Image (cartoon, helix red, strand yellow):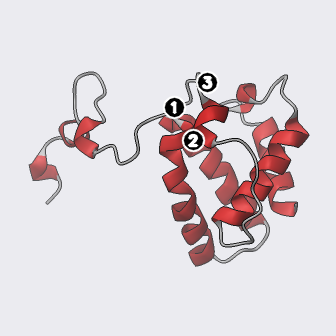
Amino acid sequence: AQFMDRVYDLIQVDNRIKSWFSGKNYQAIKEGQRVYLTELLGGPKIYKGKDLVEIHKGMGLSDYEFDCFLGNCEKAMSGLGIEDETIDEAIVSMEPVRNALMNRAQGLAAHSKMVDGQSIIERFGGEMNVE
């Protein structure tokens, strides 16, 4: 529980995402995430909670907010002295959850992620900037 305690200590002071948790049962959310992440990161398969799509439906979470959550996870792991390589593996393991939290279809291709009418590569400045 040390990890989730640290994550939620960070969330409580993170103005970017703390409002998502205000007025909610913090302890229940934290416990659900602890069990879910334990399984996601290779622990026993004990998560019996609701489907992530169902839980987050209608919340309007954004990629930015998910990135903020992942950043808090990274800070918490670093504060616990977890090695950088293991932190990277954990963050990469959490990434596939993004689509469920955003209530997007799985496997959404990069060319489908349009912002202001531009694809990622267009916002990147075109193919020449990839080289």
Q: Is residue 130 left or right of residue 83?
A: left
Hey, which quadrant is residue 20 in on the image?
top right
Residue at (49, 37) in percent of width and height: 63
* Circles 2 and 1 in contact, beta carbons < 8 Å: yes
Cα separation, mark 2 vs mark 1, equals 6 Å
Residue at (55, 24) in percent of width and height: 60
Where disc 2 sits, the SS reads helix
For this rendering, which residue is in front, 77 or 51? 51
Where disc 3 sits, the SS reads loop
Amino acid type, mark 2: Phe
- The residue singled out by tag 1 in the image is 62
Residue at (55, 68) in percent of width and height: 88
Amino acid type, mark 1: Ser
Where disc 1 sits, the SS reads loop
Amino acid type, mark 3: Met
Q: Is residue 126 left or right of residue 111?
A: left
Dot 1 alpha-carbon crowd within 10 angstroms: few under 14, some 14 to 19, many 20 or more: few
The disc placed on residue 59 is 3
